[in-house]
């Protein structure tokens, strides 16, 4: 842990000085121990008692969902792209996406480290044509969790792509 070069000295009496040395950045959720030693100009006394304190863990900062956005109509034949902002924190962040609606009412995708996730379209699986869905994301640093707002979108029924029959060239007789 790096300590800054600034030490604070508090003169309590003519011959008593208290010196404070503090870290540049206090790590989160860390226990620190402190004690008092006397110095008479020649040697330090032994510390008779110690004290301790724990720095708090700060929750990840709030973040927003980007896509699909609220009340959006989503038309896709391949995958639904989910996007959200990063939750800022000094600790590593893990995300969980919560999705509700369609054929499977509750889906939880956890252990995500990226803020981008494409969920494949499968008309026989999760997605329901013209289905209404809600989604939100949780961000955790392993100690504290923060949740995004909840967003609703509708999966619209996209017509099949144009096609052309190329074989056989003529109908059988």
Image (cartoon, rainbow, N blue to C red):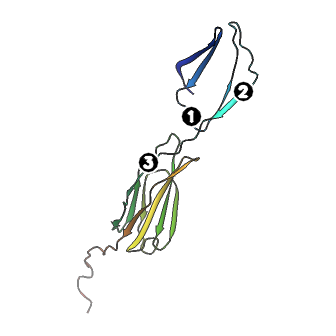
Please tell me whether residue 165 is drawn above or below residue 20 in the rendered image: below
Work out which quarter of the rendered image holds the N terminus and state it: top right
Please tell me whether residue 94 is drawn above or below residue 44 in the rendered image: below
- Please tell me whether mark 3 sits on a helix, a strand or a loop: loop
Residue denoted by label 1: 27
- Asked if the residue at tag 3 contacts the one at tag 1, i.e. Cβ–Cβ closer than 8 Å, the answer is no
Query: Residue 52: image x %, image y %?
Result: 68, 31
Q: Name, please, the residue furthest toward the bottom.
A: 173
First reached walking from the N terminus: tag 2 or tag 3:
2
| Number of on-image labels | 3
- Dot 2, crowdedness within 10 Å: few (<14), some or many (≥20)? few
First reached walking from the N terminus: tag 1 or tag 3:
1
Residue shown at the point (65%, 8%) measured from the top left: 15
Query: Residue 172: image x %, image y %?
Result: 27, 90
Image quadrant assignment for residue 26: top right
Q: How far apart, in angstroms, are the residues tagged by discs 2 and 3?
A: 40 Å
- Please tell me whether mark 2 sits on a helix, a strand or a loop: strand
Seen from the viewer's position, the closer of residues 16 and 58 is 16
Residue denoted by label 2: 50
Q: Nearer the viewer, mark 2 or mark 3?
A: 2
């Amino acid at each position: 842990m790096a300590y800054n070069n600034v030490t604070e000295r508090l003169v309590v009496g003519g011959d008593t000085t208290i010196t404070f040395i503090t870290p540049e950045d206090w790590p989160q959720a860390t226990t620190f121990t402190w004690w008092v030693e006397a110095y008479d100009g020649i040697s330090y006394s032994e510390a008779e008692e110690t004290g301790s304190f724990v720095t708090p863990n700060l929750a990840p900062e709030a973040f927003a969902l980007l896509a699909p956005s609220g009340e959006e109509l989503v038309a896709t034949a391949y995958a639904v792209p989910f996007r959200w902002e990063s939750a800022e924190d000094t600790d590593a962040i893990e995300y969980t996406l919560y999705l509700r609606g369609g054929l499977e009412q509750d889906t939880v995708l956890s252990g995500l480290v990226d803020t981008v996730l494409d969920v494949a379209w499968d008309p026989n699986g999760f997605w329901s044509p013209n289905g209404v869905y809600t989604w939100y994301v949780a961000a955790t640093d392993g100690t504290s969790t923060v949740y995004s707002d909840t967003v609703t979108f509708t999966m619209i029924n996209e017509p099949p792509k144009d096609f052309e029959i190329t074989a056989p060239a003529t109908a059988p007789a």
